[in-house]
């Protein structure tokens, strides 16, 4: 998400348009689901994916067509498009055998437009740890309306030259020119409200207003990335930070050694927390803020000493962490568990812990161990690894 956001904002800041392509429906065997998003600029540079293969090839071709036509007046397909894919072998000549169905919505975002303002506002909100959605409303006549949706309301953005600069303003501006569209979109999202963190597209039920029949609502939901909290800035912590960031997690690293906890060693960490000791690892320490680990998040205990690991695990077990991992051998683990049972922790508490941390793939180097750790986290989140799957937005 961070890479995609930065890529899109870089283009918009340069006055360049981008096309967003999102999977809005997926069934059967498809490479990606409704969390897939691709962005492309006019030169064909891209970030993200809608799954690769034939469907992505055709999506890229459709994005190029949107760039080739700047206005609907010159016979262009407009600023948005929907593509449906039937990937079964008997329905097409693409040599696809997966058998799934896929729908992709493409939306062209022009710099300085209300669409760009809404997208900027969404990114800013997600950066602050909030969920939101970019919403586009398209009528068959070519009218468009954009809004930001959060858990409580819709905020409408006016198409104007000021939209880009006003995108960061917390108090949004209403669109006075299209109250009918505003009311129709609000009513539609009261009936059907897709999930944050996913994309969706649906037709408007407009029995009382034939002019709006066949209008479409595109919803592109955003949710803050879960956090991997790494305790220990050693070799494994460093490698795990890089890999966790690569697969989409925000990373917070905590340690009491300033020589190791540096931006040079952890260039992709969202936050480096320097503490005086591990006695109170979650509390504020000078300029270092406190942290609260929630059910979406992972806590990895990768410190340098057995006693620190035991102390850390006691702290982490008192949080709502969705995944808890403890590095070390089974012998070390059993000794720590015995000590914690003596302190009053139950077998149910200790059953939350993945130790030895990571999938058993024969990992030996710090980088290989990082792969095993992140593989286990991905598997647990997906519910395909032993252990209770933890919460996902």
Image (cartoon, rainbow, N blue to C red):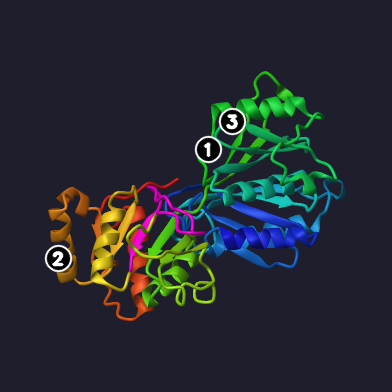
- On the image, the x and y values in percent for residue 373 come to 34, 67
* Segment tinted magenta in the rendering: 283-302
Q: Are marks 2 and 3 in contact (CB under 8 Å)?
A: no
As rendered, which of 32 and 392 lies closer to the eye? 392
Front position in the image: 156 or 357: 357
The image shows residue 142 at horizontal and vertical percentages of 78, 38
Q: Residues within 10 Å of mark 3 (few under 14, many from 20)?
A: some
Q: Is residue 125 above or below residue 152?
A: below
Q: Image quadrant for the C terminus?
A: top left
Q: Is residue 219 visible?
A: no
Asked whether 289 falls inside the magenta stretch, the response is: yes
The residue at which mark 2 appears reads as 335
388 within the magenta span = no
Residue under label 1, please give it: 194
Residue tagged by mark 3? 189
Mark 2 or 1: in front is 2
């Amino acid at each position: 998400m961070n890479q995609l956001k930065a890529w899109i904002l870089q283009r918009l800041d340069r006055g360049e348009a981008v096309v967003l392509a999102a999977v809005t429906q997926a069934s059967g065997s498809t490479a990606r689901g409704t969390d897939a998003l691709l962005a492309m600029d006019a030169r064909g540079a891209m970030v993200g994916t809608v799954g690769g293969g034939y469907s992505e090839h055709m999506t890229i071709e459709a994005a190029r067509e949107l760039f080739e036509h700047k206005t609907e007046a010159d016979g262009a397909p407009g600023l948005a498009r929907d593509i449906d894919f039937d990937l079964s072998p008997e329905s097409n000549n693409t040599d696809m055998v997966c058998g799934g169905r896929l729908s992709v919505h493409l939306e062209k975002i022009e710099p300085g437009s209300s669409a760009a303002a809404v997208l900027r506002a969404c990114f800013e909100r997600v950066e602050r740890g909030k969920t939101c959605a970019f919403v586009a409303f398209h009528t068959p006549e070519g009218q468009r309306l954009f809004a930001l949706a959060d858990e409580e309301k819709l905020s409408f953005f006016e198409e104007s030259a000021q939209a880009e600069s006003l995108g960061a303003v917390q108090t949004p501006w209403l669109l006075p020119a299209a109250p009918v569209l505003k009311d129709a979109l609000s009513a539609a999202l009261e009936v059907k409200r897709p999930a944050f963190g996913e994309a969706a597209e649906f037709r408007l039920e407009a029995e009382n207003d034939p002019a709006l029949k066949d209008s479409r609502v595109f919803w592109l939901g955003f949710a803050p990335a879960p956090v991997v909290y790494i305790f220990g800035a050693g070799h494994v912590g460093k490698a795990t930070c890089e890999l966790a960031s690569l697969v989409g997690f925000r990373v917070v690293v905590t340690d009491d050694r300033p020589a190791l906890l540096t931006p040079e060693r952890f260039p992709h960490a969202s936050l480096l927390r320097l503490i005086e000791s591990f006695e109170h690892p979650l509390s504020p320490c000078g300029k270092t803020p406190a942290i609260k680990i929630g059910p979406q998040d992972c806590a990895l205990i990768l410190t340098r000493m057995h006693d620190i690991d035991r102390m850390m695990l006691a702290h982490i077990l008192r949080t709502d962490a969705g995944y808890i991992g403890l590095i070390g051998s089974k012998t070390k683990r059993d000794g720590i568990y015995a000590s914690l049972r003596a302190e009053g922790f139950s077998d149910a508490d200790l059953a939350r812990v993945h130790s030895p941390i990571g999938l058993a793939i024969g990992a030996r180097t710090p980088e290989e161990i990082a792969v095993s750790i992140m593989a286990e986290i991905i598997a647990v989140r997906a519910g395909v690894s032993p252990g209770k799957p933890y919460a996902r937005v």
